[in-house]
Amino acid sequence: MLLLAAVVAVAGAVLVVHSPLLDRWSRLGEAPGAARALLGTRLLVEMTLLSAVSWLFECLAAYVCVKGLRLDLSLADTIVVFTLGSLAGALSFLPGGLGVAETSMAALIKALGDTTKAQAAAATLLIRLSTLWFAVALGLIGLAVEERLYRRQPVRRSSMR
């Protein structure tokens, strides 16, 4: 039911963006054109498929963490835990869903896997380390490399007019 509501909402947004409705508000500037480019059929389908594959791999990483701890959680249960925990974190509007995602995941692991609090907390910690913080660390490394490369470039002086 939730998936159907999400699909209907996205379809509605795409229809509004591709209708002449947005052209009535000139104060939006370039936003309608940019929205049409980003929500073009081909790009929307490609990015949706890429996102689905990405989420599947994150769920598989969570499943590896759960199985590594020998918890009695199926792949389907792990997908539910990871997805609902991530959505709860996103709805909290906190950076990375910190605190909310972990609490939700631990509670779901405990309930669905019939585990202790300690086992659920350990699984949650491993899942978040492997899915969120590993990516954050890679991003920080990439940012440091980019900054170093930028500083090596010769200084370009802008012309004053």
Image (cartoon, helix red, strand yellow):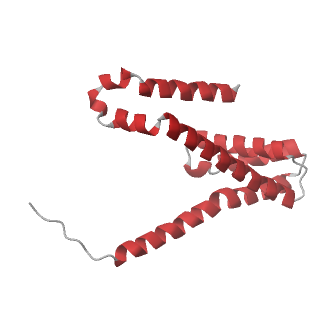
Question: Which residue is drawn at the image coordinates 36% and 32% (left, top)?
Answer: 32
Q: Name the image quarter holding residue 131.
A: bottom right
Q: Position of residue 97 (x, y in %)?
A: 61, 48
Q: Name the image quarter holding residue 148.
A: bottom left
Q: Indicate whether 68 appears above or below 22.
A: below
Q: For the N terminus, give its image quadrant.
A: top right
Task: Give the number of callouts.
Answer: 0
Left or right: 22 in relation to 6: left
Q: Position of residue 70 (x, y in %)?
A: 90, 58
Front one among 143 and 7: 7
Q: Name the image quarter holding residue 3.
A: top right
Question: Which residue is drawn at the image coordinates 77% and 41% (left, top)?
Answer: 80
Front one among 46 and 130: 46
Res. 51 visible in picture: yes
Q: Position of residue 107 (x, y in %)?
A: 79, 44
Front one among 134 and 38: 38
Left or right: 136 in relation to 60: left
Left or right: 54 in relation to 160: right
Q: Indicate whether 75 appears above or below 8.
A: below
